[in-house]
């Protein structure tokens, strides 16, 4: 019953909540629900400089304002994958920041298994995320 009410609430949000920007509206139309924003992006290309200042994961879309409490980070560098897990936080750990600081253009990373509390503080939602790729400059 509880899962059904959360699903109904999210469906209601997707269909009726106005979006704060055209970009959010386009993303929500493509993906719906809750999605991850990191470094002011949902995924795609990031410059090394932009990556250096980013350390907090946020939720946008229907579940905007939700608080991420658990996620996994997969870092892909030189054909190898390194995994990190965080519980009870929406911030990168120091180990994650160190690993991301070593990335070069062409390397990538992604967030997986992202869980967040809805703004009511008790119901949970899965958060969708896309992969990020480092580039020298934005195209």
Image (spheres, rainbow, N blue to C red):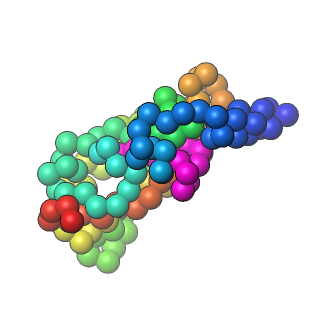
* Image label count: 0
Which residue shows up at 55% across the image and 51% down it? 29
Taking 117 as reference, is 80 above or below it? below
Q: Residue at x 48, y 51 (%)?
A: 27
Which residue is outermost to the top? 120
Which image quadrant: the C terminus? Answer: bottom left
Q: Seen in the image, is 99 located left or right of residue 35?
A: left
Vertical side of 116 occupied by 50: above or below:
below
Q: From the viewer's perspective, is 129 left or right of 55? A: right
Q: Nearer the viewer, residue 72 or 1?
A: 1
Residue 63's quadrant in the figure?
top right
Q: Identify the magenta region.
A: 27-38
Residue 74 seen: no
What percent of the width, then of the height, locates residue 7? 73, 39
Q: Quadrant of residue 20?
A: top left
Q: Is residue 62 visible?
A: yes
**Image location of residue 78, percent across then percent down:** 26, 75
Q: Quadrant of the N terminus?
A: top right
* Residue 36 part of the magenta segment: yes
Figure quadrant of residue 45: bottom left
Q: Is residue 139 above or below residue 114?
A: below
Give the residue furthest to the right.
1
Task: Kindly identify the residue that appears in the image at 57 percent across and 37 percent down.
Answer: 62
x 20%, y 61%: residue = 138
């Amino acid at each position: 019953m509880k899962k059904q009410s959360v699903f109904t609430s999210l469906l209601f949000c997707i269909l009726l909540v106005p979006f704060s920007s055209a970009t959010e509206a386009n993303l929500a139309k493509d993906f719906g629900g809750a999605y991850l924003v990191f470094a002011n992006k949902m995924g795609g290309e990031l410059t090394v400089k932009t990556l250096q200042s980013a350390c907090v994961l946020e939720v946008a879309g229907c579940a905007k304002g939700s608080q991420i409490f658990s996620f996994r980070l997969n870092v892909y560098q030189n054909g190898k994958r390194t995994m990190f897990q965080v519980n009870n936080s929406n911030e990168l750990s120091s180990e994650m920041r160190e690993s991301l600081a070593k990335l070069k253009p062409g390397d990538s990373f992604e967030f997986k298994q992202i869980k967040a509390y809805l703004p009511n503080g008790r119901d949970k939602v899965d958060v969708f995320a896309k992969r990020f790729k480092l580039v020298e400059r934005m195209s």
